[in-house]
Image (tube, coloured by chain):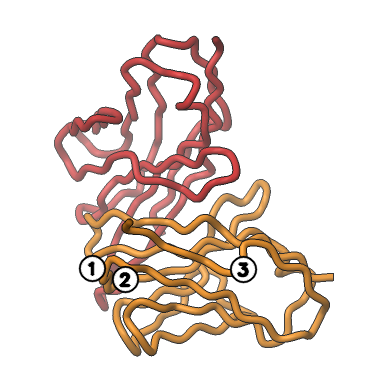
Chain colours: A orange, B red
Amino acid sequence: EAQVTQNPRYLITVTGKKLTVTCSQNMNHEYMSWYRQDPGLGLRQIYYSMNVEVTDKGDVPEGYKVSRKEKRNFPLILESPSPNQTSLYFCASSPFHRTSDTQYFGPGTRLTVL
Amino acid sequence: DAKTTQPNSMESNEEEPVHLPCNHSTISGTDYIHWYRQLPSQGPEYVIHGLTSNVNNRMASLAIAEDRKSSTLILHRATLRDAAVYYCILRSADNFGNEKLTFGTGTRLTIIP
């Protein structure tokens, strides 16, 4: 089944403890992206990647890192999480980085930073 | 950045058509108009997209104004499963070919049985 998977689905952590949220897609997509969703703010893009080893900042990249060493994986790294990073996170992928492409979203990761 | 504006919420009766509007007055010529929806506790899912002409698929229709400054998502016969937040999104590339996603605030659609 074609899908985008994220792990973990739920995570509670403390301030400053490094964490990684994994994202994997099995559709051989070139383009991958991370979003965060907060009440009243909708979805905001954090980082995106047009292909392996190519990443760029989205609208809210501060406090996050990403890497794209393999085509299928696009982990989101929080080196020193803070409470304002408590949010619902979505990973997405699309075949290429054409503006006509459809994006496929993962199920989401709910992160709480205490 | 091109922005979109949508009503915060709408209600519709079950089995009736629903017209969800979106304004994007600063749209550029290369921007595609995408619609996604998000059901409770799920990630967003694609609904439909278009550039200039009206589009139809099995889920919905997309009507695009002639000046492209607005569009309307049409659900022809709403069911309870269509209750979701609907996002109108412009996809554009900047001068370096990088992708830029601009999300609207979303419209929360409630379907009344």
Left or right for B59, reference A92? left
Residue bearing the label numbered 1: A96
Front tag of 3 and 2: 3
Give a yes or no on whether discs 3 and 2 share a subunit. Answer: yes
Quadrant housing residue A10: bottom right
Residue at 39% x, 36% y is: B23
On screen, residue B70 above or below A4: above
Front tag of 1 and 3: 3
Label pair 1/2, CB-CB below 8 angstroms = yes
Residue projecting furthest to the left: B53
Q: Earlier in the sequence, mark 3 or mark 2?
A: 3
Name the one closer to the observer, A70 or B62. A70
Name the disc covering residue A8, or none.
Answer: 3
Three-letter code for the amino acid on which mark 2 is drawn: Tyr
Residue bearing the label numbered 2: A31
Percent position (x, y) of residue A41?
62, 51
Label pair 3/2, CB-CB below 8 angstroms = no
Name the disc covering residue A33, or none.
Answer: none
Quadrant housing residue B9: top right
